[in-house]
Structures are given as C-alpha cells and as structure tokens.
Amino acid sequence: MTITVSEDSQKVDNRKPFADELCALAREDDRVVAVCNDSVSSSGLLGFREEFPTRLFNVGIAEQDMVGIAAGLANEGFIPFVCAAGPFLSGRATEQIKADIAYSQHKVILCAMSPGMSYGELGPTHHSIEDISWMRTLPDLDIIVPADEGATRAAVRDVVSNPRPTYMRIGRYRVPDTGGTVLAWQRGRAAMLRDGDDVTIIAYGTTVSRALLSAQELEPEGVNARVLDFRFIAPLDTTAILDAARTTRGIVVVEEATDSGALGAAVAMTLGESTHRVPLRVLGVRGELPPTGSNDFLLDYFGISDIPGAVREVLSRE
C-alpha cells in the first residue's frame, strides 16, 4: 500500500477526534474518566464535561496533584485520561509520572495536548520538545504519537481496551489523513505508509504528512523513499529500524522534538548495537530552545521541514 497526501488534503485538528472518541467510549464504559489542569477547553473536553459532569475532575493548575489523583482513580479501577498541555504535564509532573504511573504501573493515560512547537508565538515555556526524551527514560511506559484522525481514534480505543501506563501526544494543528483509517493498529509496531529501497524516512505525529509529501517530491529525482510512521516510540519497533538499515541506503528521522534522547537517539542506538550501519540524519530541535515564531517558522528555523535536503545529503554519503 502507498499512501499519498497533497497540500490541498482535508485537514483535522486531532484534539477533536480524540474528544469525540473519548465521549463515545465513556458512553460504553463507566470506568472512563478525565482529569485536567484547568484546561477543559484547550483539551477539547467541553463536550465531555457537559455529558459526564461527575466524571471530569478539574484540579486547577496543579499538575503534580493531577497525576497523583489519576493514579488513585486507576487504583480504584477507573481508566483515567489525564489531559494537559504537553510542557506542563511532562515538565511539572515528571516525578509523579515516574513514581505514581511508571513505577507503580497504574493504568493511567497521560495525554499531552498541543505538543511539539504548536503553541508557536507563546515561546519556549509552552513548547513541549523535551517530553519524548524524558518519557523514554521511564521503563514500562508506552509512548504513543498518533499522526492523524484515524490513528488518534484507534489509539484511544486501544488504551481503553488494553489499558497500560501510557504517555500520548495529541497534536494541536490540523493535519491530513496519513493512513490511520486503513492501516492496522498494533502495539509497538510502526506502520509502513509507502515502501522504497533508496532511503527510509522515519517520522511520527505531525511530521508524518511532511514525510509523505517529501517522498512524493523526491520521486521525479528517481529517489524511491520508504516512509515509516512510528506511532509507538515505546515499545520501539527495532525490527522496522533494522530492516530499513538492511534494505535501504540511509535513514532520515524527522521529529518535532529535541534531537537529544528522542526517537532519533533511539534509532542511532539501535543501529550502533547492530551490524547494520547506514548513513543517518536526525532532523529535530538542536542546540537551543526555540525562539518565538509560528510553528511553520520554527520548523523551517531548525531545518525540520527540509526533509528532501536531508535525504539528498544522506544519499550523497555513500
């Protein structure tokens, strides 16, 4: 199967399908509850609050309490969805996530809303670029980053059907369909959106549609690019990484995150511990906190949007 997108494709803010699916599942399962930090509107929970007023716990701007309360709810058999802006959930409550969720293995779904650099002009305090690196250090914590509406709905259904300690990014700005409605959802497995034998582009979340557009842009140059959607950062699909190293001539990792310790670092470690060595390039936030500017400006500023250039550079190293 080959997925294609265009600049004119219909785009969806993933917070809406997240909220719609959460409400649908809450109608079916009384265990589903939501906990937030005075972020009912920005997390898309207005409809949930209206339909389930006794199942929404708004703790105010108290992120550490928010995670602790969710752990207590999980201990009593509920399935809590903790919804908060990504930087405040991951930054302010890291200790509680470590001790109350990962270590204690409470089945809480931590939902980082508006992650990456989607807050744009609000600046470094509101960007969530370190969260993947931080959360990857915690054993037994799933990390999920759905790329589009279909994948978001599948992810929400999956964590209710099979609840586990989970950190999930829910994107803020509008993205096109990248195959989430037709490709099977499997825990710990990357999805191949298009095959190719020249280079592999690994992306997740908001960068997946950009990876597909870049692969299409490279086709007239005779570059046949494989695109992998790493919807699970943990557990990590090392099989897909090693297969890419065996069957393509280079790998480019694209992420709206710091390149210190996030998926690019995981790919580099996987390759370094194997006998399969190919040129690798990681496009991410490097060397500084993001300046103030729109999301598109910031992706350009850090070179994250220049995926075709990174592919050409990787292939030139042979």
Image (spheres, rainbow, N blue to C red):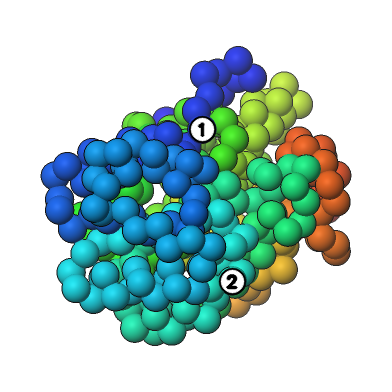
Report the front residue among 316 and 227.
227
Give, as a three-letter code, the residue at label 2: Arg
Above or below, 261 against 109 in this view is: below
Q: Is residue 182 left or right of residue 136?
A: left
**In terms of secondary structure, where does tag 2 sit?**
helix
Judging from the image, what secondary structure is the residue with disc 1 in?
loop
Indicate the position of residue 22 as horizontal and vertical percent values: 30, 44
Residue 305's spot in the image, x, y percent? 76, 39
For residue 308, what is the image quadrant? Answer: top right
Q: Answer with left or right where residue 190 lies relative to residue 80.
A: right
Q: In this view, does 160 lie above or below 24?
A: below
Would you name the residue on which mark 1 appears?
Answer: 13
Of tags 1 and 2, the one toward the viewer is 2
Task: State the residue at coordinates (59%, 71%).
Answer: 92
Q: Which residue is drawn at 55% across and 31% down?
A: 175
In primary-sequence order, the first of circles 1 and 2 is 1
Residue highlighted by disc 2: 92
Q: Residue 232 carries which label?
A: none
Camera-side residue of 233 and 196: 233
Contact, mark 1 vs mark 2 (Cβ under 8 Å) = no
